[in-house]
């Protein structure tokens, strides 16, 4: 069954991004340094096959392999797929083909982009060659793309020792995921209630636990939850951690405290920052209340209410 989503269900674009830094072993280091110098290196496996891109351990025997072999910048397309709508940071900003290319002298295929005018111009078995990037830094992007090539295979393959000056020893690989998130019916109601400075959960009809934030179903009983229950606004710190590393784009001075807070009436603790008290005075059982910033759609932080600490027995099941 298909249909339009309910108008009260929220949607928002989200980006998850992380720059992954990794060091390189001797084989990968030589491979990427070679690309910087317009040289493509593979590695010879125990069965004599030349693997491109190279790996450091034999895929058959798992033995470490180090014998580097230079292969040609020309090759043959073994399979392909047309990409009509390139995405952010892909090799080309116009339609292109993803291709697996077995370079002359290699026994395995390398995945990259092929600059071609249209899908009718691409075929399995076509000859291609590397188009090098004008500026090369020792990364797979030093191969700008492949392009069609009318020549035959290399008659005499080059032979490079794999030894370089100023080796590339590490890379930064940015990982990024762009997507549209929809919190669903239950969490949409929770978020909309927060804009009215209310915290609303949903009660399980079986175990009677109130879930905050609500999930639309009880993970324990496996039944749908629909009864909405306002909880809080005050609550109890059940456990916490002290944050000593400043996050990028977060204007909060360290150290600060991030805590699990069981709001009054809730059967599940939620996360929140604790303010209005020195970080080394935060403790389990501390009674807190939300502090809202002007125009904020959710509490900026929680501060002590001044009440006596809650007895451990009242929140021990929520830790």
Image: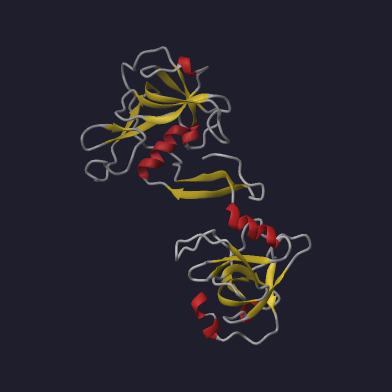
Whole-percent x, y for residue 7 in the image: 66, 47
Residue 265: percent from the left, percent from the top? 60, 75
Q: Relative to 32, is 230 above or below?
A: below
Using residue 319 as the reference point, say whether residue 244 is left or right of it. right
Q: Nearer the viewer, residue 110 or 167?
A: 110
Asked whether 50 or 77 is in front, the reply is 77
Q: Is residue 164 something that shows in the picture?
A: no
Residue 4 at x, y percent in the picture:
61, 41
In the rendered image, the vertical position of residue 24 relative to residue 83, given as above or below: below
> How many callouts does the rendering have?
0
Q: Residue at x 43, y 21 (%)?
A: 129
Nearest the eye: 7 or 18: 7
Q: Nearer the viewer, residue 52 or 33?
A: 52
Q: Quadrant of residue 178?
A: top right
Q: Is residue 120 left or right of residue 271?
A: left
Please provide percent x and percent y for residue 218.
Answer: 49, 63
Residue 42 in sight from this viewpoint: yes
- Where on the picture, by quarter, is residue 77? top left
The structure residue drawn at horizontal position 28% and vertical position 37%, both measured from the top left corner, is 67
């Amino acid at each position: 069954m298909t249909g339009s989503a309910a108008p009260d269900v929220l949607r928002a674009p989200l980006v998850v991004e992380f720059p992954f830094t990794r060091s390189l072993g001797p084989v990968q280091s030589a491979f990427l340094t070679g690309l910087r110098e317009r040289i493509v290196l593979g590695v010879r496996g125990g069965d004599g096959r030349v693997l491109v891109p190279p790996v450091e351990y034999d895929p058959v025997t798992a033995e470490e392999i180090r014998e580097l072999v230079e292969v040609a910048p020309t090759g043959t397309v073994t399979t392909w797929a047309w990409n009509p709508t390139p995405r952010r940071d892909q090799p080309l900003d116009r339609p292109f083909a993803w291709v697996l290319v077995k370079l002359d002298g290699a026994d395995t295929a390398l995945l990259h982009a092929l600059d071609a005018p249209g899908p009718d111009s691409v075929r399995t078995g076509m000859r291609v060659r590397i188009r090098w990037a004008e500026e090369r830094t020792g990364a797979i992007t030093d191969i700008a793309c492949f392009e069609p090539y009318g020549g035959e295979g290399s008659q005499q393959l080059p032979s490079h020792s794999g030894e370089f000056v100023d080796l590339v020893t590490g890379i930064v690989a940015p990982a990024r995921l762009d997507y549209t998130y929809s919190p669903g019916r239950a969490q949409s109601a929770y978020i909309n209630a927060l804009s009215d400075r209310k915290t609303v959960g949903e009660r399980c009809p079986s175990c009677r636990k109130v879930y905050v934030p609500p999930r639309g179903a009880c993970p324990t009983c496996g039944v749908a939850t629909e009864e909405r229950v306002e909880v809080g606004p005050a609550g109890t710190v059940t456990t916490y951690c002290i944050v000593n590393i400043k996050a990028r784009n977060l204007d909060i001075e360290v150290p600060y405290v991030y805590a699990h807070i069981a709001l009054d009436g809730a059967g599940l603790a939620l996360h929140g920052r604790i303010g209005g008290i020195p970080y080394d005075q935060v403790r389990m059982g501390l009674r807190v209340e939300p502090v809202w910033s002007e125009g904020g759609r959710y509490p900026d932080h929680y501060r002590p209410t001044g009440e006596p600490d809650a007895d451990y027995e009242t929140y021990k099941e929520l830790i």
